[in-house]
């Protein structure tokens, strides 16, 4: 594995912009963005669903569908306006979200008969490339390996914060998934609690490793791509027609336990899945992607995996979360996972 450099640049608001790359970054900055008001988010407990809801009123002011001539995630040095990254070039950049749902400034809001808490934690933006239109499917393998190492570093660093109980790197791709900035990027949410979906997974893995129990089926029936260390497959219990999970062949709690070979094989899987989705639709496929790792750095039961949710019902027709899904949490499927796997396998090999 090539050496990876990490530069910490302190912005004008005293927050850190992190620059990761195979080449050491030494460039002097250009003009920075004006300092913005920092949100002070809070959480309220929903007793009917037994889950926290976060409120961050400042998010309504975040940059959304800016004009084509303005991109806040492009390198700002050679532009006639400042951006989040005041340099002429970079490889991968990470910085705090200015309109965070979780941050160190979270404060409590007292409400009668409603349980509340400060929304402590962190929200970070991960910009994959200085190029405005290069997505994961167009990246080289070394760049995806760098991205994987960035995720690993952020896991380790964010878990040092005692306010943080769970770290979720994710990517929303396409306007169908709520994207308002088209420059390829992902996010990392560091929560002050374990999210409900992850808590259920943790409980399930504590009972049995259901992924290892069906590994043979994944490798033989449901796979769309596989290599020495990972299987990419449509889970037999998929809730979306073209849902894909990337799963290590052996139990591992998170990518921070990967060796160099696992990083390489994991990166190949990520690339093949995204490239395959795009080939399948003959356009950039919308999806929500998230890394499901253990809430603990050492956990012999949790089985790390990555989940991709393309919001598609059939072909490029959208899957709408309607009455049963939204109101009851019960997904209704009209495509069998084994059939979806056969279709996607042609595009992901």
Image (spheres, helix red, strand yellow):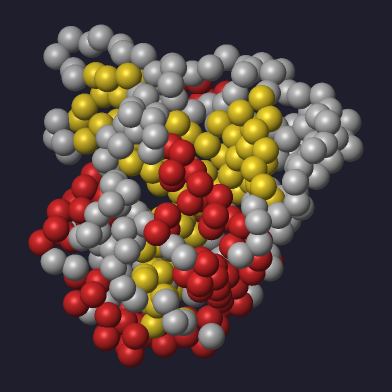
- Kindly identify the residue that appears in the image at 18 percent across and 18 percent down: 114
In which quarter of the view is residue 115 placed?
A: top left
**x and y, in percent, of residue 269 in the image:** 50, 73
- As drawn, the residue found furthest toward the left would be 207
Residue 33 horizontal side relative to residue 309, left or right: right
Quadrant location of the N terminus? bottom right
Residue 176 horizontal side relative to residue 24, left or right: left
**x and y, in percent, of residue 305 in the image:** 36, 63
Residue 261 horizontal side relative to residue 319, left or right: right
- Kindly identify the residue that appears in the image at 76 percent across and 24 percent down: 32
**x and y, in percent, of residue 121 in the image:** 39, 29
In which quarter of the view is residue 118 placed?
A: top left
Residue closer to the observer: 182 or 14: 14
Residue closer to the observer: 59 or 11: 11
- Kindly identify the residue that appears in the image at 43 percent across and 21 percent down: 104
**x and y, in percent, of residue 213 in the image:** 19, 77
- As drawn, the residue found furthest toward the bottom would be 220
Q: Is residue 225 above or below residue 326?
A: below
Residue 106 horizontal side relative to residue 43, left or right: right
- Kindly identify the residue that appears in the image at 34 percent across and 54 percent down: 293
Q: Is residue 337 visible?
A: yes
Q: Is residue 171 above or below residue 239?
A: above
Residue closer to the observer: 207 or 195: 207
């Amino acid at each position: 594995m090539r050496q990876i450099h990490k530069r910490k640049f302190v912005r004008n608001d005293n927050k850190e912009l992190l620059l990761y790359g195979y080449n050491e970054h030494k460039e002097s900055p250009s003009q920075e963005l004006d300092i913005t008001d920092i949100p002070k988010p809070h959480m309220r407990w929903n007793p009917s669903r037994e889950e926290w809801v976060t409120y961050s009123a400042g998010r309504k002011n975040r940059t959304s569908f800016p004009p084509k001539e303005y991109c806040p995630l492009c390198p700002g040095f050679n532009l006639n306006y400042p951006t989040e990254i005041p340099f002429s070039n970079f490889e991968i950049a990470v910085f705090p979200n200015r309109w965070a749902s979780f941050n160190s400034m979270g404060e409590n809001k007292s409400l009668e008969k409603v349980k509340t808490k400060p929304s402590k934690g962190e929200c970070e933006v991960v910009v994959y490339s200085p190029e405005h239109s290069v997505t994961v499917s167009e990246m080289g393998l070394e760049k995806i390996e760098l991205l994987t190492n960035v995720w690993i570093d952020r896991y380790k660093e964010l878990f040092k914060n005692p306010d943080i109980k769970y770290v979720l790197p994710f990517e929303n791709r396409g306007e169908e998934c709520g994207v308002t900035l088209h420059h390829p990027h992902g996010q990392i949410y560091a929560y002050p609690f374990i999210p409900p979906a992850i808590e259920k997974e943790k409980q399930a893995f504590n009972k049995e490793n259901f992924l290892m129990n069906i590994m043979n089926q994944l490798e033989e029936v449901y796979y769309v791509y596989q290599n020495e260390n990972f299987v990419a497959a449509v889970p037999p219990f998929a809730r979306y027609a073209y849902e894909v999970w990337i799963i290590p062949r052996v139990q591992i709690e998170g990518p921070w336990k990967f060796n160099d070979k696992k990083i390489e094989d994991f990166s190949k899987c990520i690339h093949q899945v995204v490239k395959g989705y795009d080939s399948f639709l003959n356009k950039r496929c919308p999806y929500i992607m998230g890394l499901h790792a253990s809430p603990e750095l050492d956990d012999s039961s949790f089985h790390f995996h990555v989940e991709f949710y393309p919001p598609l019902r059939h072909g490029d027709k959208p899957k709408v979360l309607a009455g049963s899904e939204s109101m009851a949490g019960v997904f209704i499927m009209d495509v069998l996972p084994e059939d979806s796997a056969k279709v996607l396998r042609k595009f992901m090999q």
